[in-house]
Amino acid sequence: MNIISKKKLFFPISEALKEYLLQYNRLVKIPFTYSELLRYFHTIPQKDKHGKNTLWETVLFQPSEMDDIHHRLVKMYAMMKFDGNESLMEHLLVERVDYCPFGNSKPFRIRIVNQYNDNHDYYYVKIADASRVYGLELEDLLSPNRINFLVDQDTLVEEHIAGIPGDMFMKPEYRWLEENEVRLAKEFVKFNERCFVRLLGDMRAYNFVVDVTADFDDVQYRFRAIDFDQQCYEGKKNIYRPQYFKENKPFVDLGMRLLNEETTQQYQQEERSLIAKRMKRASHRTARLLDAMCSDTISLPDKVETLKKELAIHYDEPQFLKCTNMGEIMRISLNLVRDRH
């Protein structure tokens, strides 16, 4: 069984990472700070459609502050979606601000509503942690998914990632999705391989979503990570492999039932080949990110020692033993994929 550190440490955004974020338009002036949103005076528990309490609470601000805070929250949404064009903000409003006091990131979830058609969207406000920022950027560069996020000092804003949470997807009420179980098993194998290559840890079922897309004769699936604070932090290699978490057992059992060893290896190689192609297409940007990571501290020395030894054995690659930090381990892991594919 995988053991996750009970409390992950937060690491500040280094100067090298700031330079990278500035060059690629991720570092901007955000019209509020995370700490400002903590100045709420009351909370109301959020309940699901069955009337059960969720982990989220709706926060209420003082009436004297609410209009100003809501205006700035809408302005932030405009910055993310249409380059801050304020003429397009007039029909948007903040319907709700939710807060999750559990977990490492303690995020705020902002619900934005279009007054013309009642369509809604979300974005999230979190403490800017270097591990999370590296994870988001690697997701954007090396996965099939694009993701929008912005950073300012200690505040991080992320767009909402649509999909059905993995822990809900396999429940009976979602069986109406007319599942293609072979495709579902295939996509979990590819997701598992993608997480391991780029060392994204703690992908238990509630930390990823399943995106379902109707095809002309069937459905397609894609697994998408939604929590990135365990990027290159833990020391045990199996923490970077979703297959080893008990929460993901339904997906693992599906693969064991429907896929043989040869097919599984084919899908693993497919994903590694795709990662190699993405690296080559964004070679300069990937290199800049890894340079910043190699000069940074995003884990503890004992975790670095453990991981480099386990990966050296796993890949039969002694280069790992020379690594002194997680950035160097990440560079070798990605270079192995690039060079072998």
Image (spheres, rainbow, N blue to C red):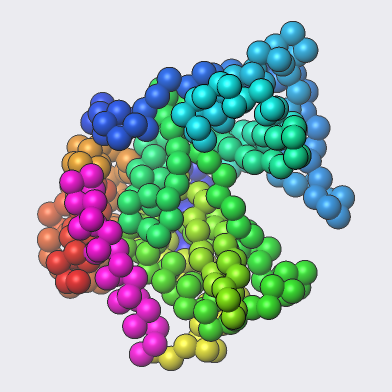
**Image quarter hosting the C terminus:** bottom left
Quarter of the image where one finds residue 264: bottom left
Counting from the top left corner in percent of width and height, residue 163 is at 60, 57
The location of residue 254, given as percent across then percent down, is: 56, 82
Total tally of numbered discs in the picture:
0
Question: Which span of residues is magenta-colored?
Answer: 262-286
Determine whether 121 is above or below 2 in the image. above
Q: Which residue corresponds to the image point at 55% horizontal and 55% vertical from the top-left?
A: 207
Does residue 305 appear in the picture of this structure?
no
Quadrant assignment, res 184: bottom right
Residue drawn where x is 59% and y is 80% of the image = 217
Whole-percent x and y of residue 299? Answer: 33, 43
* Nearest the eye: 268 or 87: 87
Considering every residue shown, the one lying at the far top of the view is 64
Q: Is residue 279 magenta?
A: yes
Q: Is residue 98 left or right of residue 295?
A: right
205 on left or right of 178: left
**Residue 278 in sight here:** yes
Asked if residue 7 is positioned above or below residue 84 in the image, the reply reads below
Residue 296 belongs to magenta span: no
Q: Is residue 105 above or below residue 85?
A: below
Image spot of residue 159 (x, y percent): 53, 41
The secondary structure making up most of the magenta span is helix
